[in-house]
Image (spheres, rainbow, N blue to C red):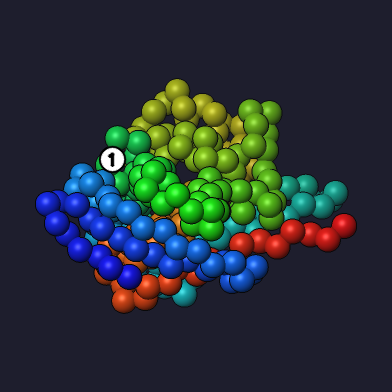
Amino acid sequence: MLNTIKSNIYQFELNVEDVSTGKKSSVSGQINDIDGDILKKFIVLGKELWKTKYLNIDKQASLQIKWDQKSGFKSIPYLPDTDLIDAFLYRMRPFILNDEKTNFLRVCNILNKYLDNEIIRGFIKSQKNLWAGVHHRSMFQISDKEGILNTDESLMKYINSYEYHRDEKKEKRFTNIKNYFKDDGLRAFYLMLILEKAKAISNIMELCEIILGFETNSIFRYKSKKKRVT
């Protein structure tokens, strides 16, 4: 893979392989300095994120949910030390907030703009789904009369109500469900979703590193989902 910087242009040549199908291809091109610098910043911030203690402890936030006819709904939350959580959420801000240049979805759109390749675009789509909680919802869904809770839309309302901002109007969305969760339950629930976002950041960061030449590996390998046989 060739990665050079000439006249503020990032040139790349990348070999790609779908390990599920064995399909191989290549893609090359140039990234302008503005977009290239955003990808570089994304990598720097991503590395800082993954150095946080929260992502390197044995157990992150979790929530057990049980229900039976006798006792009804029961939630059992687990939260690590508050300082670890707060530091983790602070490092997530540049990827979550919409007005940040390194917003995760914005970076994915930059990559899609330059990487006209079916395999890579399939990979980016899978990471956008991971970011949006699709994988989380495939395991279980929690909903109330307002709608499904483990969606990106609900997560952003939670963040703006309890974490990054204190929006009383958005906080009303969670009035009903908080009657069922214990005090830490809602935070544990949404931290599980945010952890999925951190994983997607790590995966996209790896692609950025290969494109910009930070990794010596010249082949990007992606395992796509195999279609079910019916």
Of residue 146 and residue 15, the one placed in the foreground of this image is 15
Give the residue drawn at x 19%, y 52%: 9
Tell whether 97 sits left or right of 228.
Answer: left
Give the residue drawn at x 23%, y 56%: 10
Q: Which residue is mark 1?
A: 100
Of residue 227 and residue 97, the one placed in the foreground of this image is 227
Of residue 65 and residue 199, the one placed in the foreground of this image is 199
In the displayed structure, would residue 23 be above or below residue 156? below
Whole-percent x and y of residue 115?
41, 51
User: What count of labels does the image hold?
Assistant: 1
Give the residue drawn at x 45%, y 63%: 26
Please indicate, yes or no, whether residue 58 appears anywhere in the rendered image.
yes
Element under disc 1:
loop
Of residue 5 and residue 48, the one placed in the foreground of this image is 5
Residue count near mark 1 (Cα–Cα under 10 Å), binned few <14, some 14–19, many ≥20: few
Tell whether 118 sits left or right of 104.
Answer: right
State the quadrant of the C terminus. bottom right
In the displayed structure, would residue 150 be above or below residue 174? below
State the quadrant of the N terminus. bottom left
Whole-percent x and y of residue 104?
38, 47
Whole-percent x and y of residue 34?
20, 44
Which residue is situated farthest in the right direction here?
A: 230
Whole-percent x and y of residue 167?
39, 28
Q: Quadrant of residue 4?
A: bottom left
Under mark 1, the amino acid is: Glu
Give the residue drawn at x 14%, y 56%: 6
Please indicate, yes or no, whether residue 78 appears anywhere in the rendered image.
no
